[in-house]
């Protein structure tokens, strides 16, 4: 078996600032709009990113940080879809070769989008864990592996969302973030560590709680992963992942929502805002609608992280009573 263990450094403030400078060259700030999901709450619409997901922030940051000799060998990644789309998009913009490994069960909407972007696409295994293991082995051959969450520059790139919020906020806030591998919440937690007016809360799908399990155990542990509308959040963590440690160090809260609560949030976003959102993108709103957290008299900001959902899945979710 090929040894694919990687040592990943937790980003520092200088990393976050460099990543924000790289990201803002390529991406415009996403809107912050009012919602009735909670009194005075706002939605941060990362679903409006060019690839349909916040993941493009980390992709641009990570690829921009590559030294020139490494660029020639290209990059490889694994993803349930959104990070793969982000890497393919950023690599095309920055003239690199990208290989993306996705599970055979990946959303057809994401597969179609990847094929349009022209990346080398490999479907491997019946879930994220198998796809990630295969991609890590491919990277041993010379390409740079860019994790969707366990990567210094990806985490720093996701923190660029925080720098945008800093310019948009006019009052203390509780920022509510979907959690899969933990890259986004780790980046936002590190950004918020320098502020006393922002609290960050994470939301997992009940069907896949790898990050909270690692936080409780003090190290990455395997968890059962069930079927979920929030497929982009489903899967276990790479051994040694740094994201749970970031959250523990800053006492970040991570809670969970059920499938019924996710479905309710999808319907709410379609009905009240005309937004077609994927399950993972709706979990922060699901937590608000279900009354699962106390925002401590701060304005609630739910990050709507992605829109890449198959139309058949969306139609089924919206049609169920």
Image (cartoon, rainbow, N blue to C red):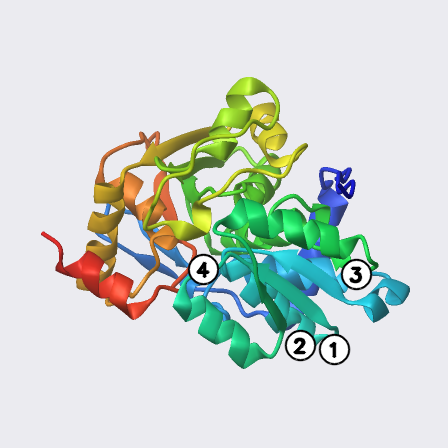
Relative to 28, is 286 on the left or the right?
left
Asked if marks 1 and 2 touch (Cβ < 8 Å), the reply is: yes
Q: Which residue is mark 4?
A: 106
Residue 248 vertical position relative to residue 78 in the rendered view, above or below: above
Q: How far apart are the alpha carbons under marks 1 and 4?
A: 26 Å
**Mark 3 or 4 closer to N-term?**
4
Mark carried by residue 143: 3
Q: How far apart are the alpha carbons under marks 3 and 4?
A: 23 Å
Q: Which residue is mark 2?
A: 92
Could you classify mark 1 by the number of other residues whose Cα lies within 10 Å: few (under 14), some (14-19), or many (20 or more)? few
Q: How far apart are the alpha carbons under marks 2 and 4?
A: 21 Å
Tell me which corner region of the image, top left, top right, bottom left or bottom right, holds residue 43.
bottom left
Q: Secondary structure at mark 1?
A: loop
Relative to 314, is 320 on the left or the right?
left
Q: Which residue is mark 1?
A: 95
Relative to 44, is 7 on the left or the right?
right
Q: Secondary structure at mark 4?
A: loop
Residue in the picture at 43% in, 55% down: 305
Q: Is residue 251 visible?
A: no
- Front residue (pair 167, 281): 281
């Amino acid at each position: 078996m090929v040894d694919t263990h990687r040592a990943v450094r937790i980003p520092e403030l200088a990393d976050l600032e460099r990543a924000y400078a790289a990201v803002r060259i390529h991406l415009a700030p996403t809107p912050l709009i009012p919602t009735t999901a909670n009194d005075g709450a706002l939605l941060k619409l990362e679903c409006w990113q060019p690839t349909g997901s916040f993941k493009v922030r980390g992709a641009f940051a990570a690829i921009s940080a590559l030294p020139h000799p490494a660029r020639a060998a290209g990059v490889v990644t694994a993803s349930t879809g959104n990070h793969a789309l982000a890497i393919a998009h950023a690599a095309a913009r920055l003239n690199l070769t990208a290989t993306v490994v996705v599970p055979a069960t990946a959303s057809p909407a994401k597969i179609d989008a990847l094929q349009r972007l022209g990346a080398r696409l490999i479907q491997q295994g019946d879930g994220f864990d198998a796809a990630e293991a295969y991609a890590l082995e491919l990277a041993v051959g010379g390409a740079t592996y860019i994790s969707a969450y366990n990567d210094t520059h990806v985490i720093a790139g996701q923190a660029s969302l925080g720098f945008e919020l800093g310019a948009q906020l006019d009052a203390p806030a509780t920022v509510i973030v979907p959690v899969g591998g933990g890259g986004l919440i780790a980046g936002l937690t590190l950004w918020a560590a320098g502020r006393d007016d922002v609290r960050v809360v994470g939301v997992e799908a009940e069907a896949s709680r790898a990050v909270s399990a690692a936080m409780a155990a003090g190290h990455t542990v395997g968890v059962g992963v069930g079927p979920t509308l929030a497929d982009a959040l489903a899967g276990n963590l790479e051994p040694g992942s740094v994201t749970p440690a970031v959250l523990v160090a800053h006492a970040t809260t991570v809670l969970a929502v059920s499938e019924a609560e996710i479905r309710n949030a999808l319907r709410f976003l379609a009905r009240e805002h005309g937004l077609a959102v994927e399950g993972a993108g709706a979990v922060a709103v699901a937590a608000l609608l279900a009354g699962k957290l106390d925002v401590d008299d701060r304005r609630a900001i739910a990050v709507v992280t992605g829109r890449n959902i198959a139309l058949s899945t969306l139609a089924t979710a919206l049609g169920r009573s």
